Image (tube, rainbow, N blue to C red):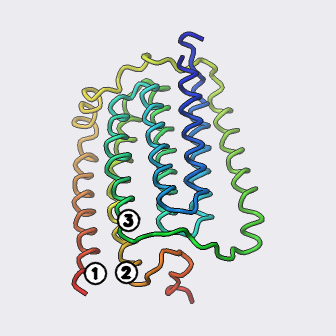
Amino acid sequence: MDGVLFLIFASIAVVCALNVVLQKQPIASALSLVGVMGSLAMLYLLLGAQFIAAVQVIVYAGAVMVLFVMVIMLLNAGAERPTGASVMASALGGPLLAVLLLVLAYVILLAFPDPRPVRFGEFRQGGAAELGYALFTRYLLPFELTSVLVLIAIAGAVVLAWREVRK
Amino acid sequence: MSAAGVPLSWYLVLGAVMFVLGAAGFLLRRNIITMFMSVELMLNAVNLSFVALAYHLGRVDGLVLAFFVMVVAAAEAAVGLAIILTVFRNRTSLQIDEVQSLRN
């Protein structure tokens, strides 16, 4: 059952990721990205990370993608125009990326030859309690620093949009 | 095949495939918003690797890292989209190769 679920959601994720890259309309790319994020949330659940799966759906598929769709709507973004890429880029780009993928896959298979299957339910530390405990003890300083980061991001976004409004 | 899953490396290879797709989108597309979405795709791929390795090591640290990646990605999305708004207001175009005032 685990394997079947993995294959289903992995293929959804890959197809949606391909769609993100291939679609000409930004809104179609954005909706495909929602598909990627939803299927990734299912994979996180299979790996026993319930809290991360919930955060993935709420923050990524919810907040971030709403922001993207809002901006696409606001800017009335249409299909992109194809522009002349250099000959070398269009000839070498695909093969080089394929080589990168092969090297990555080779290194991964070399480093993790363990054929023991991932079992649902074997990892039981993915709940909110365990993650919260780690966040508020060992990772307290990074956690507090993210609050500063988020504050700066809010201020930066407001400043960037505000200047344009007053012009 | 009752409870048999797939090996851990499959999850990592899936992450690699999605990372390469995101890199391809970032390098090949010409629309600023789509390029930005490709960056999000790469971040998600790395997050999948973090969660898979947290499972492998049986520790919660990988999940904490994935959580921090999500926080940074959300902040980055807010600022990045504000920058895209500013660029669009100044140039009325989302094509990345028309934003070239820094060239030469």
Which picture quadrant has residue B51?
top left
Of the 4 image quadrants, the one containing the N terminus of chain A is: top right
- Residue at 44% in and 84% down: B91
Which of labels 1 and 3 is toward the front?
Answer: 3
Residue lying farthest bottom? B104
Indicate which disc residue A164 carries.
Answer: 1
Circle 3 residues within 10 Å: few <14, some 14–19, many ≥20: few
- Residue at 62% in and 37% down: B13
Of the 4 image quadrants, the one containing the C terminus of chain A is: bottom left
- Label 1 amino acid? Glu
Residue lying farthest top? B2
Indicate which disc residue B89 carries.
Answer: 2
Q: Position of residue A159 (x, y in %)?
A: 24, 74
Secondary structure category for the residue under label 2 = helix
Q: Which residue is mark 3?
A: A73
Whole-number angstrom distance, CA of label 1 to CA of label 3: 18 Å
Q: Position of residue B27 (x, y in %)?
A: 61, 64
Q: Is residue A97 left or right of residue B29?
A: right
Which of labels 2 and 3 is toward the front?
Answer: 3
**Marks 1 and 3 close (CB-CB < 8 Å):** no
Name the chain letter of the residue that bears numbered label 1: A
**Marks 1 and 2 close (CB-CB < 8 Å):** yes
Secondary structure category for the residue under label 1 = helix
- Label 3 amino acid? Met
Whole-number angstrom distance, CA of label 2 to CA of label 3: 14 Å
